[in-house]
Image (cartoon, rainbow, N blue to C red):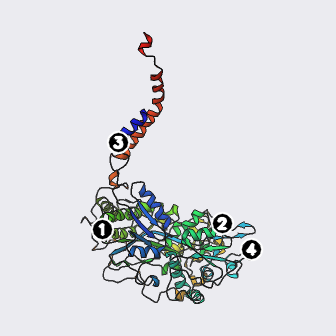
């Protein structure tokens, strides 16, 4: 009874937490490819008191619901308009101002469930041409000659190969079919012709499967992952994060230099060096990606199916998105771009390079209702990076004093087995670097190579020796160069009316909501303003301490008082 009374009194005096957080609750929807990153970030900001809901319903649904005023933000791998947009989305675009900003980079992986000689097989190699034939319905058996050629010495089973694809509108599907369209247009045309569900001149967010007996459709990233995990002789496509979570092996994909790789954070970072980013700030698709040169990049460390995923945010208030909600969206977007990138690699993604972070932060400034803490965070980051004095976000791709365009992961990415000596020299020459010491190489598990550092052994038998660094995809992977260039103007090329600095990401006319521009400001911690200084959290710590003391001391003290003889008894 005594403890209950004390507890009630203390709680009444200090309060457990503020009745309402500094930021109103918001909800977003869209990409499941990026879903694991979003889940982690919303959990992290939740520790500060902010509440962010996110539904990984697929990029198509997310874009539609944001446009229709049913979500406060969306996440998608493709934009509403342009040559990389889905034709089925025609007429679906917000009637209010909005912005796109990259929030996560990653690699589309190919999870599989396969046993060889009764044991789980974890070293499957696939060339890009074989991959295109599998996912266009031309290969339906695991011992197909093309797969056998990619895996010499492996006795592959004579078993039906089941292809597992997304049933919902998916940015992962859009990016994957865009890769097939541009790199293997003949295979993509066969897919469209045999199913009648796509046009051979445009990618699609809805994977065509009609008439393909060995194809199975599942909803969402969790759906395709779960199906492969539960069924042998299957293969799917989705972000590497899902494979790591499910402990599923992924195929090593052959790049244009002839090496079979996994989509590690480093390999994705290397590949995205060749992404063309639309730097026209007047374009609706400002910061959109063109991946044409990513697919065929000849750095031996490059994973060819790498991409960015984008947050789509409001640039004005609407009947749904008030200035107060805008402050929440701005806070969450800033967290995602800054501290959120620290967890990217552990989650199976790759952190954004600092120049893209800075450019994305210019987009954040357009969100209505930014509060002073968020604006200060944006200003501090920009001033610290552009002056070279600091790395306010602790972004793993950036070293103070370097050009923010220089991704540290590219400089430290290990070379694959079989790429040493001249192979490494040719790779560094792509960046204008000469005389760099030869590095030890690693195999597909990330372990140091047991041999082949002289450039004579290639991982997985890719057949690319020391000179593999400059080999073209037409020689090492059968890529159809006729499809590597789009016949239409790329989304990322944009107009040329107004440009932004590709190194710093800063645009000449980019407005700042406090008029402070990039002026240095005081540092802002990641916790909410309401939790700064001495407040409820500190009071709660004291409360816990008091309760512990009471729980330890109260029972013996109470017993002593009860058993103490009364004065009347002593007389």
* Chain-order first, disc 3 or disc 4: 3
Q: Does the image show residue 445? A: yes
The residue under label 1 is 368
Categorize mark 3 by other alpha carbons within 10 Å: few (<14), some (14-19), many (20+): few
Q: Nearer the viewer, mark 1 or mark 4?
A: 1
Quarter of the picture containing the N terminus is top left
* Chain-order first, disc 2 or disc 3: 3
Q: Which residue occupies the foreground of this view, 477 or 494?
A: 494
In the image, is residue 291 above or below residue 343? below
Residue 199 spot, x, y in % from top left: 52, 88
Task: Please give the name of the residue rendered at 51% of the width and 63% of the height, measured from the top-left corner.
Answer: 345
Between the residue at mark 2 and the residue at mark 3, the CA separation in whole angstroms equals 69 Å
The residue under label 2 is 451
State which quadrant residue 383 falls in.
bottom left
The residue under label 4 is 155
* Chain-order first, disc 1 or disc 2: 1
Indicate which disc residue 12 carries.
3
Between the residue at mark 3 and the residue at mark 1, the CA separation in whole angstroms equals 37 Å
Indicate which disc residue 344 carries.
none
Q: Nearer the viewer, mark 2 or mark 3?
A: 3
Quarter of the picture containing the C terminus is top left
């Amino acid at each position: 009874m005594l403890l209950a009374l004390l507890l009630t009194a203390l709680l009444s005096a200090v309060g457990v937490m503020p009745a309402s957080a500094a930021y109103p609750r918001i909800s977003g929807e869209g990409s499941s490819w990026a879903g694991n990153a979003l889940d982690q970030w919303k959990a992290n900001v939740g520790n500060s008191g902010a509440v962010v809901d996110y539904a990984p319903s697929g990029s198509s649904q997310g874009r539609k619901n944001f446009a229709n005023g049913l979500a406060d933000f969306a996440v998608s791998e493709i934009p509403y308009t342009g040559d990389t947009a889905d034709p089925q989305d025609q007429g679906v675009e917000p009637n209010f101002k909005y912005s796109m900003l990259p929030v996560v980079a990653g690699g589309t992986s190919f999870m599989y469930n396969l046993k060889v000689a009764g044991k789980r097989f974890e070293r499957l190699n696939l060339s890009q041409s074989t991959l295109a034939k599998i996912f266009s319905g031309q290969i339906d058996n695991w011992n197909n000659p093309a797969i056998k050629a990619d895996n010499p010495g492996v006795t592959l089973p004579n078993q039906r190969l089941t292809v597992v694809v997304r049933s919902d509108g998916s940015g992962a599907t859009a990016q994957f079919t865009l890769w097939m369209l541009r790199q293997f247009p003949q295979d993509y045309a066969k897919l469209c012709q045999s199913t009648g569900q796509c046009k051979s001149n445009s990618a699609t967010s809805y994977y065509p499967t009609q008439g393909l007996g060995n194809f199975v459709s599942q909803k969402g990233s969790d759906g395709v992952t779960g199906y492969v995990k539960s069924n042998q002789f299957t293969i799917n496509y989705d972000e590497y994060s899902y494979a790591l979570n499910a402990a599923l092996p992924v195929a090593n994909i052959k790049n244009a230099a002839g090496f079979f790789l996994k989509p590690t954070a480093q390999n994705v970072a290397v590949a995205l060096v060749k992404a063309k980013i639309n730097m026209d700030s007047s374009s609706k698709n400002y910061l959109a990606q063109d991946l044409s040169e990513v697919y065929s990049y000849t750095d031996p460390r490059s994973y060819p199916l790498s991409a960015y995923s984008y947050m789509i945010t409001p640039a004005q208030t609407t009947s749904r998105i008030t200035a107060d909600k805008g402050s929440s969206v701005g806070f969450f977007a800033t967290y995602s771009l800054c501290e959120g990138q620290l967890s990217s690699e552990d989650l199976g993604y790759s952190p954004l390079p600092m120049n893209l972070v800075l450019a994305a932060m210019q987009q954040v400034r357009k969100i209505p209702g930014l509060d002073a803490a968020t604006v200060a965070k944006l200003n501090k980051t920009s001033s610290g990076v552009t002056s070279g004095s600091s790395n306010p976000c602790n972004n793993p791709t950036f070293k103070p004093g370097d050009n923010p365009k220089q991704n540290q992961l590219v400089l430290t990415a290990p070379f694959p087995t079989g790429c040493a000596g001249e192979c490494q020299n040719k790779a560094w020459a792509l960046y204008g670097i000469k005389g760099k010491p030869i590095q030890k190489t690693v195999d597909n598990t990330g372990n140091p190579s047991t041999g082949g550092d002289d450039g004579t052994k290639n991982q997985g038998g890719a057949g690319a020796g020391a000179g593999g660094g400059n080999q073209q995809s037409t020689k090492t992977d059968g890529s159809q160069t006729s499809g590597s260039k789009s016949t239409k103007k790329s989304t990322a090329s944009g107009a040329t009316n107004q440009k932004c600095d590709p190194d710093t990401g800063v645009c000449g006319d980019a407005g700042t909501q406090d008029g402070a521009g990039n002026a240095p400001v005081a540092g802002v911690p990641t916790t909410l303003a309401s939790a700064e200084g001495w407040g409820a959290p500190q009071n709660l710590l004291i409360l816990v301490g008091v309760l512990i003391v009471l729980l330890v001391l109260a029972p013996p003290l109470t017993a002593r008082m009860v058993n103490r003889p009364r004065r009347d008894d002593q007389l």
